[in-house]
Image: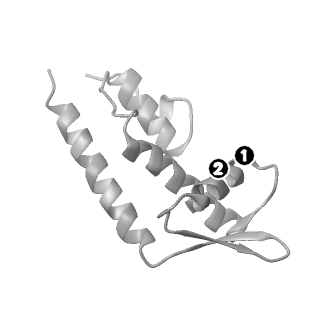
Amino acid sequence: KLTTTVFDTAGRGIERAKAYLAKTASFPFPAATAEWQKIKIYSDVRNVLIHAAGYLEPGNSQHERVKKAAKAPDSGLLLHHHARSQIGLEPGFLPSVIETLERFYESLLSATKKP
């Protein structure tokens, strides 16, 4: 019975999907979870790796978020400092991402069962 699609929603990527579910579909999106916060960082990491070959540019807000995340213990991210800073992935990074996505999926599934 929805009259709009996700493409009619403002935003980009996962934020667009979140906005669509939360506003248009009146879905109780679990945005306050720790998993969602990590997923947003993973999105930033992906963008830095794909669009900047992992190099972190000072003053770029997305790059600064990734740099801050990399400094957290057990982030699974490595910071290499040469002429420029660059991020890398530790072997445990991808299993951590999968675990986070699975926990978030459980939150989403639980939200669909609420009246």
Q: Position of residue 114 (x, y in %)?
A: 16, 26
Q: Amino acid at mark 2?
A: Arg
Q: Residue at x 26, y 48 (%)?
A: 105
Above or below, comparing residue 84 to residue 113 in the picture: below
Q: Position of residue 12 (x, y in %)?
A: 56, 41
Q: Amino acid at mark 1?
A: Ser
Quadrant location of the N terminus? top left
* Residue positioned most to the front: 73
| Location of mark 1 (residue) | 61
Q: Is residue 105 left or right of residue 44?
A: left
CA neighbours of label 1 inside 10 A, class few (<14), some (14 to 19), many (20+) = few
Q: CA distance from mark 2 to mark 1?
A: 6 Å
Above or below, comparing residue 88 to residue 102 in the picture: below
Q: Residue at x 59, y 61 (%)?
A: 70
Q: Which mark is residue 65?
A: 2
Q: Which mark is residue 80?
A: none
Q: Is residue 79 left or right of residue 4?
A: right
Badges 2 and 1: C-beta atoms under 8 Å apart?
yes
Q: Position of residue 26 (x, y in %)?
A: 32, 21
Q: Is residue 91 left or right of residue 26?
A: right
Q: Position of residue 110 (x, y in %)?
A: 18, 37
Mark 2 element type: helix
Q: Is residue 20 left or right of residue 53?
A: left
Mark 1 element type: helix
